[in-house]
Image (cartoon, helix red, strand yellow):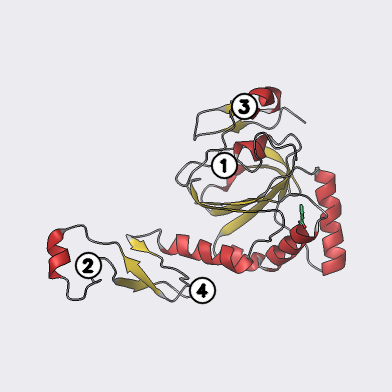
Amino acid sequence: MYCYLDVKCYACGMTGNAIELGAEREAPCAGLRIGDVAPDFSARSTTGNIRLSDYRGRWLILFSHPADFTPVCTSEFVALAKSSDAFEERDCALMALSVDSLFSHFAWLRLIRDRFDIEVRFPIVEDPTLVIGRAYGMVAPHDNDSATVRTTFFIDPNGVIRAMTCYPANVGRSTPEMLRTLDALQAVDDGPVLAPANWEPGQALLKQPDASLDTVFAAKGQTDWFMREANRGATK
Ligand code: BEZ
């Protein structure tokens, strides 16, 4: 089980697997930032063996959860499974990850199906050695608790991390906010436009400010040189 996990961190150039975990613990690739290439890995999941880089060409949300069979995590998986069409419409795949074993994932998904009448069809990766969780900074390197926090990575079709969020174990994520963040990332992707606070598809985006003193002095309104509406984002 140890050797098939092969994590290369493009952020710091480290390659790690479970055999080198001692060194990994002291120098984890936990410093991932927006703009870094998401470290590649292959692992077992509830939909078979998967490799992160196979998702190139579409958006991917990779997210960790602390543990199977826990209340907040269960509510998140029910909510995400119910919204899976909405992610699909945005050409975005979902991939979950926790330290629990593949068979624990299977048993949990069966329980969710039976109790909440929804099938979780996106993959849940098993990360028993925490090699992926540590590479992504989902676990604190010196934490005694092996559980991952609720980290979410928005990865673009080129495999680049475009946004990250981190919630504690006792607060669940918002599916509408995950979709809104994805919408905003996709809306600003094509041009020099910006998504303002609380932006939703259909609302105006903003133009990139023009960095020239002539523009500043020529602007009619006080804020027109740095805050102007661009086109409206498409409605979803
Ligand atoms: C939960 O998902 O409910 C949970 C997970 C880990 C610790 C506490 C709560």
Secondary structure of the residue carrying numbered label 2: loop
- The amino acid pointed to by label 1 is Ser
Question: Which residue is located at x 72 percent, y 27 percent?
Answer: 3
Query: Residue 236 at what x, y percent from top left?
Result: 51, 73
* Residue ID for mark 4: 236
Residue 190: image quadrant is bottom left
The residues tagged by marks 4 and 1 sit, at their Cα atoms, a distance apart of: 27 Å
Q: Mark 3–mark 2 contact, CB under 8 Å?
A: no
Query: Residue 183 at what x, y percent from top left?
Result: 50, 65
Label 1 or label 3, whichever lies nearer to me, is: 3
Left or right relative to 55: residue 127: right
* Residue ID for mark 3: 26
In the rendered structure, find residue 63 and report the number of the disc placed on it: none
Residue 117: image quadrant is bottom right
Q: Mark 3–mark 4 contact, CB under 8 Å?
A: no
- The amino acid pointed to by label 4 is Lys
Question: Which residue is located at x 60 percent, y 41 percent?
Answer: 137
Q: Earlier in the sequence, mark 1 or mark 3?
A: 3
179 and 70: which is toward the camera: 70
In the rendered structure, find residue 225 and report the number of the disc placed on it: 2
The residues tagged by marks 4 and 2 sit, at their Cα atoms, a distance apart of: 30 Å
Q: Earlier in the sequence, mark 4 or mark 2?
A: 2
Q: Earlier in the sequence, mark 3 or mark 2?
A: 3
- The amino acid pointed to by label 2 is Trp
* Residue ID for mark 1: 53
Label 3 or label 4, whichever lies nearer to me, is: 3
